[in-house]
Each structure stands twice: as C-alpha cells, then as structure tokens.
Image (spheres, rainbow, N blue to C red):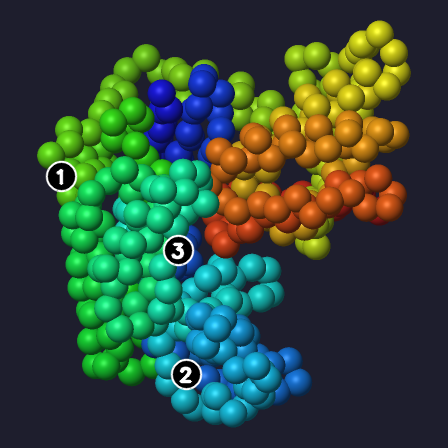
Amino acid sequence: MRQMIVHCEHETIQMALIEDGRLAEFAVERSREESVVGSFYKGRVVNVLPGMQAAFVDIGLKKNAFLYIDDVLHPHLEKQPKQKPSISQLLTAGQELTVQVMKEPRGGKGARVTTHFSLPGRCMVYMPTADYVAVSKKIGREAERARLKSIGEQLRTDEEGIIIRTVSEDEPLEFLSGDLEYLRKEWTRILEKAESSSAPALLHRDLGLLQRFIRDSFDPLHDELVIDSMLKGEETKSYLKETVPGMEPKVTYHTGGGPIFQAYGLDEQMKAGFARKITLPEGVTIVVDQTEAMTIMDVNTAKYIGGDNFEETVLKTNLMAAQQIARTLRLWDIGGIIIVDFIDMDREEHRQQVVSVMEAVMRKDRTKSFVVGWTKLGLLEMTRKKARENSSLPFAKPCVNCGGKGIVIE
C-alpha cells in the first residue's frame, strides 16, 4: 500500500508519497506560485524569428512565451509536411491564437507553449486535433493493448486523438466513454472562452497539486490519503467521489501526535534524501551536483568493504548506487541531462546489469526518463523529462554569498 501524506499550512501544501515505508516523492505548491503547466491561454504573437524557427507569444505572464515550429505543425507526424516550412509562413506578428503551456517559466526564460493540445483525464488524455489512438506502454499484454486501442478508435470522432492510460487496463468501454465526454465538454468550454476573450487571457487552468496526483496516480482501491486539514480533506474526498463514482476513498485525518511529517517519520528521511552527499546503509556514497545545464552524480565506495575481489566490490557498489540514483531522480524531480560517474567497470555485462537495475526502479516513476548509454569515458548518460519547477528541493535557496557555487571569493 502507498500512503500520500499531505501537510497544509497557510498558503502552502506539501505532499509526500510513501512506498513500502520509504519516501518516494515530495512536492510543494504555494498558492502565490501556482503552476501554469497544462493551462490554456489566448495569446498574441509578439514577434516571429525565422532564424530560430520560433515565435514569442504574449500570454499575460511576466515573460513572453516561446513557441517552436514543431509545436505549430500538425501533432500527428504523418500529417506534417516532408519539408518543414518557415515559421513566418505559419505565424505573423499580432496574430491571436490559443496555446497550452508545456514548460514552466524558468530563470530568465519564459514558458514554453504548444498548439498540440491535451487534456488529461483519469483514464485517458484527450487530444482534440491529434488524429490517433495510443495505449500506455505500461500495459504489457498485447491482447489488452489491442482491445483498448480498438475501444479508442470506436470512441473518437473526426480528428480527435486519445492516449489510454494504465488505469484503464481491463476496464469496460463505459469506463472510458464517460471520461471522454467530460473532456470533450472541457474542450468546448475552452473554445467558447477563447472566442469571447481578447488576448492575452487565461482560458483554463490545470488542477492543483492534490487533484493532479489523484487524477494521475492515486489508486482509491489500495492507496491511502492522510491529511492534516479537514477543509482540504473534504475537498479531496469530493473530487475522488466525482472521478471514481461509487468508491469510498480512504482519507485519514491527522489531528494529533505532533506535526504530520514528524509523526510518519518523514523529517529524517527528507533530511537524508535531499542531502548533497547521500550515504547508503552499506557505506556507499553518491554526491549530487546540479548545474543550469545538467545534473552530475558521482559514485564512491567510501566505507563499503565489498565482496571477495575488487571487480565484485565495484559491481555491488554500482548496483546499489543505481537503485538509489533512480530513486533520487524521482524524489528530487530532477530533469534534463543527467550524467552518472559510476566506478569504472571493465566487463560489458556488468555495465548492462547496472543499467537494467536502474531502469527497473525507474519504471515506478511517472515522469518519462531515458538511458542514452555509456560514453567513451565510461559515464552513464540519461535524460528525464520535467515540466514543473515547484516540486524541487524543499525550502532550498541558493546561498546569498556564493550564489549556490559552494565557494566565496574573497
């Protein structure tokens, strides 16, 4: 059973996900810093840059949003032109259009937006113009995949696209049909608001942290929600009953016994899990350094004595580190390019074992990741998708003296 522990205080919600007694995910959402990912806006093209094949769009935020040509072309690859046109042929300055945010504003960069629209529901993702049906790769049985794809083709009309989510496995047609009708109505509301609004304007905002997790990941049959706010708890129960009719959700209210995170032993887990230097019980250490361009992880045997010989010690060290690294990527919600400096291994089968172990742990991660492979220098290169910026290290801020470099120049 998984437990979702939620702490509500003033304008802040903190969510910790526990799997098998271990902290697996942590996220923070502050009402003054609401996420814009997934939200729809009516924007106005400010300028078009043919040399970058991109445009900047005013959607009402501090920084203009960035729209790349691939996000303007048809969402179905087979319907895109063989020769990519200039973006100036598709967009002009002053033009108004509806866009959806796919990446948060970050640093000096504005949000990244797209015209490849998608509305996530509990059992499917609705794409009004994508013109294809796909099934979650986590559904492994080919017969079930074929059945769900057939249902998707039966349900969709015109150019609608559907991605059927893992939760739909073994569910009847009616289960998907109700979700699709709800999402169609949402899309109609967005179109109607776009028609009556002047750019820039917010047309639709995605759900908050609690509701997003429930929609995307919460299993009301097996998972438990523990929360220390009666108000938020009742709101969440109502949302659960709406999304899963006939189901009585497992919601527990924490009313005493100290702060909720302390009561569930999360304070120490968070302190250890978010440390720059992570030490495993066996003595192996992993040092994590984040730069603007990438994240680097360095593995060391440290106090680990190991096996009968050096080669066995190195393999065991790297296998333990691989499991922890996969968990750390998910816990810290690290995105972008990731480089891991494992201890050098001479045998190819050992390197493959390390990758296999890491991929097995990463399958529990809702965020897509991809192991690129080993570089010529023996480093493991991988990527992990990340759209939101508000789920990072808890309450962490760069040092005012060194700017996060860890050194002070005198």
Q: Mark 3 points at which residue?
A: 134
- Counting residues from the start of the chain, the first of labels 3 and 2 encountered is 2
**Label 1: element kind:** loop
* x and y percentages locating residue 170 in the rendered image: 27, 37
Name which quarter of the figure residue 227 lies in. Answer: top left
**Residue 359 located left or right of residue 114:** right
> Where is 50 relative to 356, above or below?
below
Residue 351 sits in quarter: top right
Q: Are marks 3 and 2 in contact (CB under 8 Å)?
A: no
Residue depicted at 36% across the width and 69% down the height: 131
Q: Which mark is residue 245?
A: 1
Left or right, residue 147 beside residue 179: right
Q: Are dots 2 and 1 in contact, CB under 8 Å?
A: no
Measure the alpha-carbon separation of dots 3 and 2.
32 Å
The residue most toward the left is 246
The mark that comes first in sequence, 3 or 1, is 3
Given residues 353 and 45, the one toward you in this image is 353
Name the residue that disc number 2 marks: 44
How far across and down, in percent of the image, does residue 121 sit? 28, 51
Label 2 CA crowd tier, 10 Å (few <14, some 14–19, many 20+): many
Instruction: Look at 43% across and 65% down and name the residue there.
Output: 101
Quadrant of the rendered structure where residue 322 is?
top right
**Looking at numbered disc 1 in the image, what kind of residue is underneath it?**
Pro
Q: What element carries label 2?
A: strand
Q: Can residue 320 be seen in this view?
A: yes
* Location of residue 80 in the rendering, given as x and y in whole percent from the top left corner: 49, 78
Q: Which dot, 3 or 1, sits closer to the camera? A: 3
